[in-house]
Image (spheres, rainbow, N blue to C red):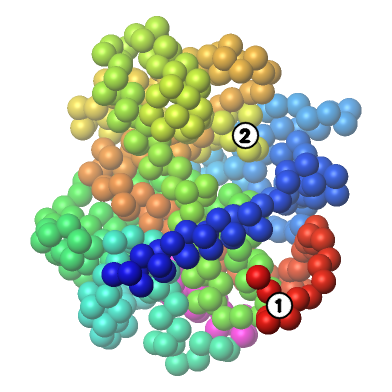
Amino acid sequence: MQNEATHSSMLQDLVKLAERNGYIDPELYAKYDVKRGLRDADGKGVLVGLTRIGNVYGYDVVDGKPVAVPGKLIYRGYDVEDIIHDIEKSEQFGFEQVIYLLLFGELPNASQLAEFDAIIGENRELPNNFVEDMILKSPSSDIMNKLARSVLVSYSYDPNPEDTSIANNLAQCIQLIARFPTMVAYGYQAKRRHYDGKSMYLHNPLPNLSTAENFLRLIRADKNYDKLEAELLDLALILHAEHGGGNNSSLTVHVVSSADTDTYSAIGAAVGSLKGRRHGGANIKVAEMMDDIKANVRDWSSEKDVGDYLRKLLRKEAFDRSGLVYGQGHAVYTISDPRAILLREKARELAVVKKCVEEFELYCLIERIFPAIFKEEKGADKRICTNVDFYSGFVYSMLGIPRELYTPIFAVSRIAGWAAHRLEEIISGGRIYRPAFKQVGDLREYVPIGKRR
């Protein structure tokens, strides 16, 4: 016990030492003109690469000055709104069509899409013994960590994992895209049994179903879902599939791939990036914040009551006292986030069916009144728009999806974009990413170990 106490005391001292020697004065970033977080001083991302895969528009440049415009999300030159409207008219599921577009740069015709759907369907099953050995025998309390491990151990089930040809990389990427929903669903079921003490249901994925249909089937005990539920999840998958090459996880794919490593290492690293609370976990924070608002605001329809509580959030007087209203504001979008608009309109339909209209109207009220409240409280002219995270968590809750699956669903979608960026990097990159860091510590005279105090 004495040794444990001594070790604990030493550990505390080492933590303090690490904190002291890990601290860098923020003023030094300005002094040396460091692009902290690969951003300019105004928050704009530093241009470090070129891509043909996706783009995000939030403003135009007129006479050298940025002018806010309604947001646009572009996949391979196509406005995502146009893609979604066409999918809705044809009454089909669209995520697989978007996967094809992101990977190959062209929209598929009917026969190409049917053949690609068949390829995806044939690859949804996990390898023999994978579920028992890699998921059920080593469950994780966090499904994103379980997913990352599943990706990395897939290397061991690949007869040719180090083949760097474009054909082999494409095959590996397609297989991972197809298997992600199964990996996530089985990881979730293992967690339910091992950590939550609940029943576990392992259903086989069906090759003739879409990604959205399969995922709902795999996570539900009765395997049942209706068309509207699957359509809404399909829409969410489309909207999260890609967001330009500059987001943290897609950049991670480029950085790791540029080192000339294997597909599983690159995609596994991207999963780790997306897990981060500053990246893929934002919709969970929205859901937790909305729980807090619903518990503390008596009249959800009152602009005054809701507005007063939003002010408390901004003043660090409520919820997590961070001063943030989660789901509001975006680094690029200014007037509007097109993903939030598209998701909100489809969510309205489901809210009626699920008898969640009162809650849906609360979300809409916050979206409507928050920009003016932000301006009053902060005295800033910065334009604030609702982002996709604000509505995605609400959509998932109406679908009965537990919160621990919110970020893994993001990964099920974003693997399409990651795969496209992986292929783009190995085809056109050719140079390892190596940014510069300036060392700012003082030079010190070396002290032999016998003379150290």
Residue, disc 1: 451
Quarter of the figure that contains the N terminus? bottom left
Question: x%, y% of residue 102?
Answer: 57, 60
Assign a secondary structure to mark 1.
helix
User: Depth check: 99 or 12 in front?
Assistant: 12
Whether residue 209 is visible, yes or no, is: no
- Of residue 36 and residue 241, the one placed in the foreground of this image is 36
Magenta stretch holds residue 424 = no
Question: In the image, 164: left or right of 97?
Answer: right
Judge from the rendering whether residue 207 lies leftward or rightward of residue 170; answer left or right: left
184 versus 361 height, above or below: below
Q: Quadrant of the C terminus?
A: bottom right
Q: Give the camera-side residue of 162 and 307.
A: 307
Q: Residue at x 81, y 67 (%)?
A: 444
**Rendered position, 189 above or below 373:** below
Question: What mark, if any, has residue 333 been given in the picture?
Answer: 2
Q: Is residue 167 magenta?
A: yes
- Where is residue 313 drawn, in percent x and y? 45, 23
Which residue does the image show at 61% across and 52% down from the upper left?
247
Magenta-drawn stretch, dominant element (helix, strand or loop): helix
Residue type at numbered disc 2: Tyr
Specify the farthest residue to the right. Answer: 63
Among the two numbered marks 1 and 2 on one chain, the one whose residue lies closer to the N terminus? 2
Instruction: Give the secondary structure at mark 2.
Output: loop
Kindly check if marks 1 and 2 are in contact, taking CB atoms under 8 A apart as contact: no
* Residue located at (68% from left, 82% from top): 450
The spot of residue 170 in percent (x, y) is 55, 76
From what the image shows, is residue 40 above or below residue 340?
below
Identify which amino acid the numbered label 1 is placed on.
Answer: Lys
